[in-house]
Image: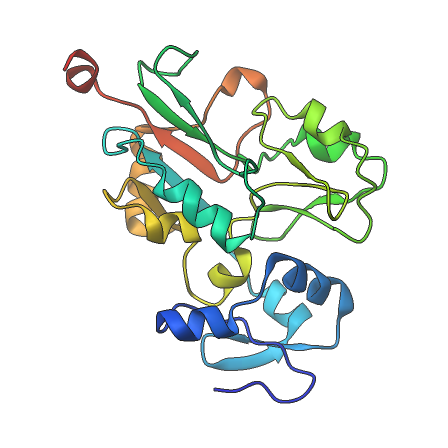
């Protein structure tokens, strides 16, 4: 389906060439969100952007299984390419053995945790950091003043400063792909399948959350991570 004039497509994964041709960039997506009056495609249906946002009824969850994670860095590379980040900048950073890790893990990928009580949102003087109805924490690049208060406030060190735009940015969960029925780039790129993504009420997600196996990172920080959870390495994996 091709977009008519004045319409903006938000596509899920079809073929690689179609995704590359039609998927919205982070900046375009956020500008659409501020613009209003435009149409987006959710699945096969066109609707006003505001109506599409109102239909997001269940928060998204990303669970990272550290029993499966090999530390290959494919998630980080996919994220960098998807967001066209310059060399040396990444929304995902990996803590490795020898650094302070959680649960005996030898490699721990860390990114924005999309906290329910996000300190980065509280300290932002321009109100550029805000919560999307899906639970994802976003940055309005039009109002961000680049003060870096959010980067200082984030206990997960998940913010990066983009010199070219003057914006302090972070993981936005590839929300344009997600709302179109797809998955974040890091999830599709994960070779061992360590990244599990879906809605909070999806059976697999709901079972992992209710079982207690999926845990937030550093709950003692009090930020209430709302999207990203981890399955820490089990005892057998730690001893091997």
- Is residue 81 shown above or below 48? above
The answer to whether residue 59 is visible is: no
Name the image colouring. Answer: rainbow
Where residue 100 appears, x then y in whole percent?
43, 11
Q: Is residue 56 left or right of residue 29?
A: left
Where residue 31 appears, x then y in whole percent?
72, 63
Rendered image quadrant of residue 27: bottom right
Nearest the viewer among 112 and 119 is 112
- Is residue 28 shown above or below 122? below
Where residue 141 appears, x then y in whole percent?
75, 51
* Residue at (42, 53) in percent of width and height: 185
* Residue at (77, 43) in percent of width and height: 166
- Is residue 73 shown above or below 224? below
Nearest the viewer among 206 and 22 is 22
Where residue 108 appears, x then y in whole percent?
38, 25
Q: How many marks?
A: 0
* Residue at (54, 62) in percent of width and height: 176
* Residue at (61, 53) in percent of width and height: 133
Q: Is residue 230 left or right of residue 83?
A: left
Rendered image quadrant of residue 14: bottom left
Q: Is residue 162 left or right of residue 185?
A: right
The answer to whether residue 20 is visible is: yes
Rendered image quadrant of residue 68: top left
Nearest the viewer among 38 and 157 is 157
- Is residue 37 shown above or below 23? below
Q: Quadrant of the C terminus?
A: top left
């Amino acid at each position: 389906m091709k977009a008519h004039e004045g319409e903006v497509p938000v596509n899920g994964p079809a073929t690689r060439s179609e995704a590359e041709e039609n998927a919205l960039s982070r900046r375009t997506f956020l500008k659409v969100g501020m613009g209003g009056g435009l149409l987006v495609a959710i699945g096969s249906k066109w609707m006003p952007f505001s109506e599409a946002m109102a239909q997001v009824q269940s928060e998204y969850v990303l669970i990272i299984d550290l029993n499966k994670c090999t530390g290959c860095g494919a998630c980080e590379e996919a994220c960098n390419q998807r967001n066209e980040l310059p060399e040396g900048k990444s929304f995902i950073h990996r803590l490795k053995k020898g650094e302070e890790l959680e649960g005996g893990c030898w490699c721990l990928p860390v990114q924005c945790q999309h906290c329910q009580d996000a300190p980065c949102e509280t300290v932002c003087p321009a109100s550029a950091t805000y919560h999307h109805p899906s639970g994802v924490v976003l940055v309005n690049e039009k109002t961000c003043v680049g003060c870096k208060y959010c980067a200082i406030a984030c206990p997960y060190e998940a913010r990066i400063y983009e010199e070219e735009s003057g914006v302090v940015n972070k993981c936005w969960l590839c929300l344009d792909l997600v709302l179109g029925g797809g998955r974040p780039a890091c999830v599709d790129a994960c070779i061992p399948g360590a990244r599990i993504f879906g809605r909070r009420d999806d059976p697999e997600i709901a079972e992992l959350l209710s079982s207690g196996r999926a845990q937030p990172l550093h709950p003692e920080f009090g930020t209430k991570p709302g999207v990203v959870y981890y399955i820490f390495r089990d005892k057998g994996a730690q001893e091997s």
